[in-house]
Every structure is written in structure tokens, then in C-alpha cells.
Image (spheres, grey):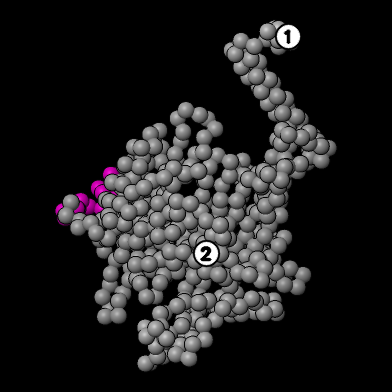
Amino acid sequence: MKRKLPMLSAWICGVVFLWSGAAFAQMKSLATAEAELAKMAHTILNSDSTDLKFELNKEFITRFTELLKQPESYGYEFDSLKTISRLRPADNSFRIFTWYIVDRPKDTYYGDYAHYYFGLVQRKYTDVSGKVHYLVIPLMEMERIPKGIESAVTDNYAWFGALYYAPRERPNVLAYDGSYYKLESKKGGVLEDGKETEQVITFVQGKYRGRQLKEVKKLSYSNQVRVKRKVRYYVLMGWNGWDHKANYKVLDIMTFDPEDSSRVVFGAPIIYFDQIPKARALFKYSDYAPFSLNTGSVKTGFLNLGRKDMVVYDHLAPPRNARSTDMYELGPDGSYDALSYYKRFGGYFEWYRDVEVADKFEGKRHKREMEKRQAFYAAQDSATFPDYNQLSSRKMARRARKANQREYKRQRKAAEEGIRESGLKIGEAKPEE
């Protein structure tokens, strides 16, 4: 479990929105400032002292935030920040920077290795008068992940932290056009308590494969009207290192609040694995298993002659002979699933199981590699003796058998040393009192 950082979130908010910027009144050139930030970012990721990393991270956020407020920084790439993820969509409406800190325990090898994530969104915004603004919006990671996070629509103050990465062969964040319904009060209309109706955003509930979806409770006051508004969904793919046992990959939906230009909304109930939509897709998998979440061309239609770009990911399954309590041991089984976007009904993602990737070289090669890794991974379950005849090759079986033998010898040797150090003698009868 992550350790609590009591004042970190409040401190960052103060830096972004309240800091006067007097210390950077005479800012150095972008290249010089970038070089200094690059050294700090490298130390933040690689230092052995967790306390030093957090203290340095505060200064990094302060300086980087003020730098991003300068209009000339919007087109600057910051290529020297190798440990910082830097992404923008094709419409160039914003940039998102994400990075993380690893809390490495000093006194034990098997520590939690908790990951803490940080982010800044640089947004170019034009108001109704035509004036251009450059906003810097902080991303505040949740201290605890609540149940039902996959169905929750949050904002930049309750962010599921992740290091975002660009889709395969695409330099930009994925973007899709959709729509939503907004409840607005009619002219002169008031609620029973005398206050005007609050503006509430709801999402379209349409049909899914010919079946009517479960509808949310609709407000039907006589003084309200549902107004359809357009929205652009930005799809982010990210990695969360979590701890020494499991990792997460996340497919999150990002939008901007139309009423508050400094508020970023994460999640939208448009991802359908069944009839009840999810706001985001989370994939938890073993720290020792590779997992791919990316884009790809999928075969569709009659005789698989069609092609469509989708979000493609490895199908997760437990290793053979795994215990029911070891769900963190999930890994790829060699097959693929996909999420395909459709613009109808306001826009939504639909889940497809066991798809065939159209890219023959990448698809078949990746599938063979996943099958070998999964077989080797399943053979490492020390609680049971794997059936070596089921492995993909004799070479894999011999490798797994030797690995298990080495592990047994290591554990036995460690146990014998522990017994000798404790002064106990195996087989000696307990003396009578």
C-alpha cells in the first residue's frame, strides 16, 4: 500500500494556481531551462533516496509549471526530458506530461515498490471574446483506488495515475467525435426550493447490438430540457507499475469540462464489455508477464476481408495450475481482444473477443512469442508440478525443470543456514524438564 503524502496534493495546487511567478520573472531561455529540468527529472526517477526524489519533485513541478505558462513553450518539444512522457493530439488542443516516482524499500528486497504518478496538462484555450489563454492544469493521483473505479467519472483532482504512451505507429493521442446530453433549465423555470436548475451532463444511452441498454434515471422536471452537445473524446493508454507483484494498464477517456476551462474530466461511460457501460478499462496483470495494449488493424466482415483500426490487447488468463487467490498472476494466453469505436448513439466502444490482427508479421510473431512466454511462465508455479508434456517444446520443458531444481536447492540451502544460525539441531529429542 502506498504511504500517505499529506500535503503534496495541496502543495501542487498552490503552485499551479496561486504562485505569483516572481522567482521566474526573468526566465532563462527554454533550452537552458530544459537542460536543468532534464537533470532533475533523471534524479527523480533514478535516485536511491525516496525523500530526495519527493523534495526535488516539488521544485521540478514549480519550475516546469511556470515554464509551461509561457506562450512560446507550447510548440517546444522538450525532447531532453527523457523520463517524462509528452503527448498531444492531432488537433494540438493540449499537451499532457506524466511521470512517476518509485518508492524503493532500503531494508528488504521484497518491498511494495509503490509507484506515485504526477502529471500536468498544458491547454491552449480561446475564450468567447477570442482571447487565447495558456492553462497549466495539475493531475492529482488518488491516494486510494476505490471500488468501482472502472465505472466512475472523475476529474483532474481524482486521477487514476498512469504513465501515458503513444499508440503504435501514431505519434498523437487518439481522438474520436461523439455527443452527450445536457440538462438545462428553461427560461424562468425554477425548482421547488426556488433555485435554478443546475447544469448536469449525462451521456447518451442508446442501443447495443440491437438490445436496449439499461437506462440511467432520467430527470423529467417540467422546467428542464435536454440539449445535445458535441464532444471530443481523447483516448489515453497508460501503464501503472503498482507494486512488485502486479501492474496495471489503463484505457482512459479524457474530455474537457465545457463550463470550466481548467477542469479535465477522466472517464466516460462509453466502453461496453456487456450491456452496462464502463468509464474506463483496467487490465491487471502479473509483474512477470508481458501485456500489450495498443492499436492495430483487425480483420472484419465477410471472410475477414475487411480491415478496421481498433484498440487491440492481449487476452488475460491465469497460468495453468494457479491458485484462485493468485489473481495477480494473470498473463496473456496468446489470443487478442479488441475495442472498436462507433460514432452512432453518441459514440461508444464495443468489445470483440478473439480477433485476428491483420498485420501478419507483427501479429503472428507476437502470438508465438506470447505462447512461449506463457508456457514458461506457467511452468514457474512452484506450488504444483507442471505437466511438461504440455509445454510448447522439449527445450522449454528442460529449461523449466532446471529452473525449478535451482529454486528448490536455493530454498533448502537458505532453510539449513537459518536453522544453523538459530542453534537448533534437526532430529534431537527435546530434553525432559
Observer able to see residue 289: yes
Q: Which amino acid lies under the numbered mark 1 shown in the image of this protein?
A: Ala
Q: Is residue 19 magenta?
A: no
Give the CA distance from mark 1 to mark 2.
Answer: 62 Å
Q: Main secondary structure of the magenta part?
A: helix
Observer able to see residue 372: no
Instruction: Decide which of 367, 286 is in the foreground and name it.
Output: 286
Neighbourhood count class around disc 2 (C-alpha, 10 Å): few under 14, some 14–19, many 20 upward:
some
Residue range of the region highlighted in magenta in the rendering: 24-36
Q: Which residue is mark 1?
A: 429
Direction from residue 93 to residue 205 in the image, left or right: right
Neighbourhood count class around disc 1 (C-alpha, 10 Å): few under 14, some 14–19, many 20 upward:
few
The residue sitting at 70% across, 78% down in the picture is 211
Direction from residue 337 to residue 279 in the image, left or right: left
Q: Which residue is mark 2?
A: 152
SS assignment at label 2: loop
Q: Position of residue 373 (x, y in %)?
A: 68, 42
SS assignment at label 1: loop
- Which corner quadrant of the image does residue 329 belong to? top right
- Which corner quadrant of the image does residue 349 belong to? bottom right
Mark nearer the N terminus (1 vs 2): 2
Instruction: Decide which of 237, 57 is in the foreground and name it.
Output: 57
Residue reaching furthest to the front: 433
Q: Determine whether 184 is above or below 375 in the image.
A: below
Q: Which of labels 1 and 2 is toward the front?
A: 1
Q: Position of residue 84 (x, y in %)?
A: 40, 49
Q: Is residue 35 magenta?
A: yes
Direction from residue 302 to residue 261 in the image, left or right: left
